[in-house]
Amino acid sequence: LAKTTQPISMDSYEGQEVNITCSHNNIATNDYITWYQQFPSQGPRFIIQGYKTKVTNEVASLFIPADRKSSTLSLPRVSLSDTAVYYCLVGALDYKLSFGAGTTVTVRA
Amino acid sequence: DGGITQSPKYLFRKEGQNVTLSCEQNLNHDAMYWYRQDPGQGLRLIYYSQIVNDFQKGDIAEGYSVSREKKESFPLTVTSAQKNPTAFYLCASRPDGLWDTEAFFGQGTRLTVV
C-alpha cells in the first residue's frame, strides 16, 4: 500500500471551504484514492473516491493532479456538523484496508 | 434493512477473561475487517478476511483471534494475552475486497476491561 501523509488537524469556520491535502508519493499505476469521514464514537463512512483529475459528489470534491502524487479533498461551505476526522487511503487490488491517523477538522461558529 | 451490526455496543469484562465481539452483515459482502481505535488515534487493523474460512493478520493481531465460518459473521475474540484491551472496536465489510469498492462500518463496540 502507498504510504500517505496528511495534516494532523485543521481549523475552520462555518461557511468556509476546507481543503485537506494528502501526499502519496509512491502511488502505483492501479491505485485509487479514497476518503472516509469519521464522527466521534462512530465507524467511518465513505465520502469520495477517484483515480485522476476531479471527482465531485453531493458531499465533497476530490482533486488529483496529473502526477497523482497528492490529492485534495475539498469540503465546500462547511458547517459545525462537518467536524470530524478525515482519512485518505491509497491502494489497489489489495484486500488489506489500512487507515492512517487521519486529519481532525474542527469547524467553529 | 441491510447493514453491518456489531453487538453489544458497550462491554465490560474483568482482566484475564476472554471476550468475543460480534459482527454480522447482511450485505452479501465477501471481505470483512476488524479494527481497534484508541482515544484520539486512527484505526488500526487487527484481522481481515477475504472469503469464508480464510483470514489474515493485520497490523496488531497479537492477543486477538477470529473465525470466518459463515459469510455473514466475523467474530473477534479478545484474549487474556492482549495487554491493553480497553478500546473502541470497529468491524467493516466490503463487497469483494478489491480496492475500488466502498467499505461499510458497524457502529462499534466499546470494550472496557477492569
Image: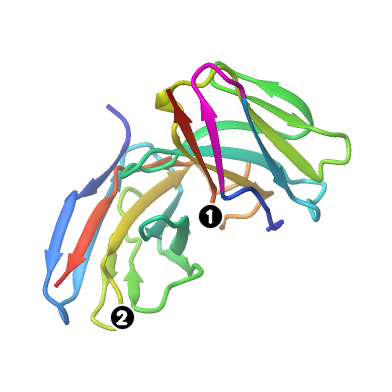
**Residues marked 1 and 2 touching at CB (< 8 Å):** no
Residue B101 visible to the viewer? no
Secondary structure beneath label 2 = loop
Q: Mark 1 to mark 2: distance in Å?
A: 22 Å
Residue corresponding to mark 1: A101
Kind of residue sitting beneath label 1? Ala
Q: At x 70% / y 23%, what residue is drawn?
A: A55
| In the image, residue A38 above or below residue B79 | above
Of B114 and B67, the residue lying toward us: B114
Residue A14 is one of the magenta-drawn residues: yes
Measuring from the top left, give residue B14's x and y in whole percent. 11, 74
Q: For the residues tagged 1 and 2, is the chain the same?
A: no
Measuring from the top left, give residue B4's x and y in whole percent. 32, 41
Residue corresponding to mark 2: B83
Residue B90 is one of the magenta-drawn residues: no
All told, the count of numbered labels is 2
Residue B32 visible to the viewer? yes
In the image, B54: left or right of B79?
right
Label 1: how many Cα within 10 Å (few below 14, some 14–19, many 20+): some
For residue B12, what is the image quadrant?
bottom left
Magenta residues? A9-17
Label 2: how many Cα within 10 Å (few below 14, some 14–19, many 20+): few
In the image, A60: left or right of A65?
left
| In the image, residue B53 above or below residue B23 | below
Measuring from the top left, give residue A72's x and y in whole percent. 70, 34
In the image, A29: left or right of B110?
right
Q: Mark 1 falls within which chain? A: A
Q: At x 37% / y 60%, what residue is drawn?
A: B38
Can you say which quadrant of the picture contains the C terminus of chain A? top left
Q: Mark 2 falls within which chain? A: B
